[in-house]
Amino acid sequence: MGLITTESMRAPGPQSTTTRPVERILGVVEGRRPGKTVIAFGGLHGNEPAGLEAVRSVLAQLQRPGTDLAGKLVGVAGNLQAIAADQRFLARDLNRGWTAESCRRIVTPHADECPEDREQRELLELIRPLEAESRDPLVILDLHSTSGPAAPFSIIPDVARNRQLALSLPIPTLLGLEEILEGAMFGYLCSRGHMGVGVEGGQHSDPETAARLEAVVWLSMVATGNLPADRVPDLPGQRERLRRAASTLPPAVRIVHRHEIDDDDDFQMEPGFDNFTPVRRGQLLARDRHGPVRAALDGLVMLPRYQGQGNDGFFLGTKVTRRWLMLSATARRSRMERLLALWPGLHWDASDPNTLRYGGTEPPSAMLRTLRLLGYHGVRAKPPGLEFFRRPP
């Protein structure tokens, strides 16, 4: 077993202006036993260095004799050009635009492509061979940090294979965000049958953030069976680091509202909002060129934007209990969704078994609770009614 950094594994791209160059492939460690292929992404946003530090640290420690790794760990740097510029992105968010159509489009270089189109193409060229050679679904660890102070939490497309991994980490899990944000990289890979978690480790500049993200990688490697628990350096300490940072938070939060902004909105969050800050309906959260921006409902603020790029002002979520998570898992195993068509006005989309159409615009609250229990977090207008959807199980 060893660290592989051959020229054939490297992708072209600009190097960092720091003293430590950033290659696309941070490293690959292969075990002697068969196992899952784990891909740990850092720097998908160029101003988030903590994920890169965490992946490098784990790769280096896995080179020690006697690690007993199964499968392989592949460390990948995301947006090389944005990393070099220390910006979230240059032309567009690299964590958007991951739809089947856009991925087909960018496979062939074109004259008017932007820097992130090239970055995305190189990532696809890296991922596709790993897909082809793996007998199991790939395990994706998408490591991030936030502009404001933050406790760690995970984000998953809400399907069973992702929940199992997310709930092995002693941090809250966000449900529904991947359904609201169409085109996220992890959502695209999940739709191709892969599994994993996205994790926000803390504030960009907090030195604790890289240590938390490193703990996420170690615990995930144990949860997937790639690494024996007794071969992880200070496994109880790794777990306690995460548990301590999230000890006062709910086990899960379901995202129910996104405040989307335009580039010319002059959006400014009011000071003092961290992730999981409780707010009341009507409370002032931000200001833009139209005036005050107030909370649309009672809930928890998530991912407030205190940096200058991106089209997500903030999200609002509601607490989810462990009992709800257990009930939801049981309902899905029982194939309870077959009964949804008995609800007046609700019917299956004939072209997609994971999409339901509703003939009205104000569904009963009991219907909404049942749909969310079964993973239908996504909702969009489909005149004359609504369309509910979920990720394929």
Image (spheres, grey):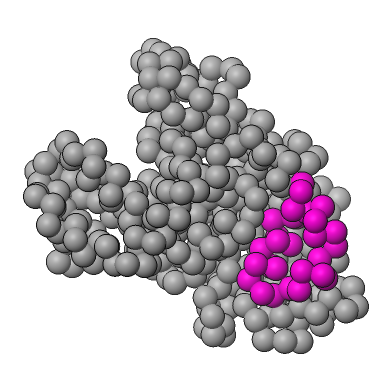
Could you tell me which quadrant the N terminus lies in?
bottom right
Is residue 254 something one can see in this rendering?
A: yes
Residue that protrudes farthest toward the right in the picture: 65
390 vs 193: above or below: above
- Is residue 176 positioned above or below 231 on the image? above
Residue nearest the observer in this picture, 61 or 278: 278
Q: Nearer the viewer, residue 371 or 221?
A: 371
Determine the residue positioned at 58% across, 69% down.
139
Q: Position of residue 374 (x, y in %)?
A: 33, 56
Above or below, 63 relative to 311:
below
Residue 218 included in the magenta stretch of the image: yes
* The furthest residue to the top: 291
The residue depicted at 82 percent of the width and 70 percent of the height is: 230
Q: How many marks?
A: 0
Residue at 52% of width from left, 21% of height from top?
269
Above or below, comparing residue 357 to residue 130 in the picture: above
Considering depth in this image, is 198 or 169 the residue closer to the camera? 169
Left or right, residue 12 beside residue 229: left
Q: Position of residue 169 (x, y in %)?
A: 64, 55
In this picture, residue 347 sits left or right of residue 237? left
Residue 24 included in the magenta stretch of the image? no
Q: Nearer the viewer, residue 223 or 386?
A: 223
Our reading of the magenta stretch's main secondary structure is helix
In the rendered image, residue 340, in percent from the top left (x then y), is placed at 19, 57
Q: Is residue 81 visible?
A: no
Instruction: Indicate the position of residue 277 as horizontal and vertical percent values.
Output: 55, 26
Q: Which range is magenta?
A: 214-241
Could you tell me which residue is drawn at 76 percent across and 48 percent down? 240
